Amino acid sequence: MILNVRNRKIYIKPGSTDMRKQINGLSIQVQEIMKKDPFAESFFVFCNKQKRLLKILCWEKNGFWLFTKRLEKDRFPWPESKKEVKEIDSKEFTMLLEGIDFFGKHKELSFSKVS
């Protein structure tokens, strides 16, 4: 399934989330932990501890959508830092769903002279 991100903002909640939570529990996390408006036309993305299950919550006109993707093999790249809610763009969102780790940084190189 392809999610149409249109002009929506996409927020991920770093760290793990209890995936027993459904729409009500996740919308409370959006409001209280992520400090965002669950009724904004945005995607809010959550991941479980094993990094094999994603839930995506979004509001559309008159109700919530809750999308779930479970990997049978491999794991999603996911930030562990719970410092801030991270906003990602649609390109990064596609990379996340494809399993590409854009969270990792390139190693810093240090040279003493030009050769």
Image (cartoon, helix red, strand yellow):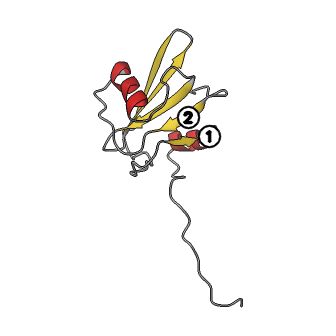
In the picture as drawn, the residue positioned furthest to the right comes out as: 115
Q: Is residue 82 above or below residue 93?
A: below
Q: CA distance from mark 1 to mark 2?
A: 6 Å
Residue situated in front as seen by the camera: 39 or 65: 39
Q: Is residue 104 above or below residue 24?
A: below
Q: Is residue 17 above or below residue 5?
A: below
Residue situated in front as seen by the camera: 91 or 12: 12
> For the C terminus, which image quadrant?
bottom right
Q: Quick check: can you spot residue 95? A: yes
Q: Position of residue 111 (x, y in %)?
A: 62, 85
Q: Position of residue 40 (x, y in %)?
A: 55, 23
Q: Which amino acid, mark 2?
A: Ile
Q: Identify residue for label 2.
A: 10
Q: Position of residue 20 (x, y in %)?
A: 28, 27
Name which residue lies at 67% across and 90% down.
Answer: 113
Name which residue lies at 54% across and 70% down.
Answer: 107
Q: Residues within 10 Å of mark 1 (few under 14, many from 20)?
A: some
Q: How many marks?
A: 2
Name which residue lies at 56% across and 39% down.
Answer: 93
Residue 115's label in the rendered image is: none
* First-in-chain label (1 vs 2): 2
Q: Identify residue for label 1.
A: 89
Tell me where residue 47 sits by quadrant. Answer: top left
Q: Secondary structure at mark 2?
A: strand
Relative to 65, is 106 on the left or the right? right
Residue situated in front as seen by the camera: 88 or 55: 88
* Labelled pair 1, 2 in contact (Cβ < 8 Å): yes
Name which residue lies at 61% across and 25% down.
Answer: 4
Q: Secondary structure at mark 1?
A: loop
> For the N terminus, which image quadrant?
top right
Q: Position of residue 38 (x, y in %)?
A: 47, 23
Q: Which amino acid, mark 1?
A: Asp
